[in-house]
Image (spheres, rainbow, N blue to C red):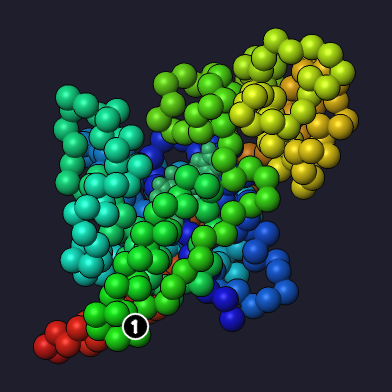
């Protein structure tokens, strides 16, 4: 059996990067032959690293739960839980903080980027120790596979380093996880700035396809996507370094149609046609998801029930692993 774990922070709007880079892969994994035991978290404690107002994270948690089920997570096949409902995350995170070094955490690109963006503002210690909490999220579930977008690669690497060091110090206790990326869509780029990834913290909304955007808005964003001024029969080709905008559209279209960027490139000669086709493919892909989201978000009671069931299941697994880690260290039993 393969244990699968992945998570999303409840901050900002759900966007196309989340869907193509991560969630769609989670849903596909549910239908595979190999037996998989899936855990998908809504990591509200992670969101606190950048949250300073009351109520915001709770509301975003419910919203994200609706998106999780709307994209197709099936409560029969996947355990969907909220991080703060499982206290073991914070408990193992402390052990991980004592396993990772200050130097390792200082080298994390996400910390460097996010703290640079917040220059002159409050930078929480949590933003710095974030990878320790993320390592705990993964290791608590003995995860073999962690399906994520490319931006999480370094975080899964440091999780492996933490597990290796812990096992070396205290004996074989924690399972080493592997990051798993989708063949296309692992790094969805901002449509207005195709050298930056699409992100909740992007400065302009025109570059982000929100999952809740109506079809007309999605088409408009794709039609206005930044490309380049090449012309000629081979202008539409996949070359990330030389043609980031066109390559990003090809990657999105490939992800949406289960194809490859090179193959879809062969079908277009004009940028306008590529933009329209990509927009239409995304609209078609999102339409049923948006429909289910609208139904689910109106049924708060059912969402709360599903999260309570998931939380209880997650606690069972997490409790066992935490106990194992405490025992390996030799903490005095209570
Ligand atoms: P988060 O909440 O930023 O994003 C959730 C998932 O969406 C993917 N993603 C993207 N994929 C492709 N292109 C993009 N532009 C794009 N933007 C986001 C992310 O790679 C991720 O898979 N640190 C994590 C949350 C986390 C986590 C975990 C993930 C906490 N604990 C344990 C896995 C396992 C994060 O901030 O993802």
Q: Residue 136 is drawn in which quadrant?
A: bottom left
Query: Where does the N terminus fall, quadrant-wise?
Result: bottom right
In the image shown, does 191 or 194 lie closer to the viewer? 194
User: In this picture, is 259 found above or below 327?
Assistant: above
Q: Residue 225 is drawn in which quadrant?
A: top right
How many badges with numbers are in the image?
1
In the image shown, does 310 or 298 lie closer to the viewer? 310
Residue 69, how many percent across, how many down?
57, 54
Secondary structure, mark 1, is: loop
Q: Viewed as shown, does residue 38 lie left or right of 118?
A: right
Residue 239 seen: yes
- Furthest-front residue in view? 242
Residue 277, how many percent across, how many down?
79, 27
Residue 236, how many percent across, how many down?
79, 24
Residue 48 seen: no
Q: Dot 1, how many residues are within 10 Å of its Cα: few (below 14), some (14-19), or many (20+)?
A: many
In the image shown, does 163 or 221 lie closer to the viewer? 163
Residue for point 69% across, 31% down: 239
Q: Viewed as shown, does residue 290 lie left or right of 268?
A: left
Residue for point 59% across, 45% down: 186
Query: Where does the C terminus fall, quadrant-wise?
Result: bottom left
Q: Viewed as shown, does residue 301 lie left or right of 212?
A: left
In the image shown, does 34 or 101 lie closer to the viewer? 101
Residue for point 66% across, 24% down: 243
User: In this picture, is 173 found above or below 42?
Assistant: below
Residue for point 67% across, 14% down: 228
Residue 275, how many percent across, how many down?
74, 22
Q: Which residue is mark 1?
A: 173
User: In this picture, is 330 found above or below 151?
Assistant: below
Q: Viewed as shown, does residue 99 lie left or right of 36?
A: left
């Amino acid at each position: 059996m393969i244990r699968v774990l992945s998570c999303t922070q409840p901050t900002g709007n759900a966007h196309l990067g989340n869907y193509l880079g991560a969630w769609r892969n989670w849903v596909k994994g549910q239908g595979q032959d190999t037996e998989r035991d899936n855990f998908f978290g809504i990591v509200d404690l992670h969101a606190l690293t950048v949250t300073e107002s009351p109520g915001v994270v709770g509301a975003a948690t419910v919203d994200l739960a609706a998106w999780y089920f709307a994209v197709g997570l099936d409560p029969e096949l996947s355990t969907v839980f909220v991080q703060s409902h499982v206290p073991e995350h914070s408990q193992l995170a402390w052990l991980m903080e004592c396993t990772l070094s200050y130097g390792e955490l200082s080298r994390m690109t996400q910390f460097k980027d996010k703290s640079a963006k917040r220059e002159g503002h409050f930078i929480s210690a949590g933003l710095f120790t974030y990878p320790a909490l993320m390592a705990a999220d993964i290791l608590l579930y003995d995860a073999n596979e962690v399906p994520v977008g490319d931006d999480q690669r370094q975080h899964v690497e440091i999780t492996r380093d933490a597990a290796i060091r812990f096992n070396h110090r205290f004996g074989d206790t924690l399972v080493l996880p592997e990051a798993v990326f989708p063949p296309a869509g692992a790094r969805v780029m901002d449509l207005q700035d195709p050298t930056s990834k699409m992100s909740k913290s992007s400065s302009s909304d025109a570059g982000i396809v929100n999952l809740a955007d109506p079809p007309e808005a999605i088409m408009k964003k794709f039609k206005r996507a930044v490309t380049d001024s090449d012309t000629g029969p081979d202008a539409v080709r996949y070359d990330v370094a030389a043609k980031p905008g066109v390559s990003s559209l090809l990657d999105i279209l490939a992800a949406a149609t289960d194809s490859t960027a090179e193959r879809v490139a062969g079908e277009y000669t004009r940028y306008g046609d590529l933009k329209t086709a990509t927009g239409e493919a995304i609209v078609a892909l999102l339409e049923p998801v948006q429909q289910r989201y609208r139904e689910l978000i109106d049924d708060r009671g059912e969402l709360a029930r599903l999260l309570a069931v998931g939380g209880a299941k997650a606690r069972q697994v997490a409790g066992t692993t935490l106990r194992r880690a405490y025992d390996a260290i030799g903490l005095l039993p209570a």
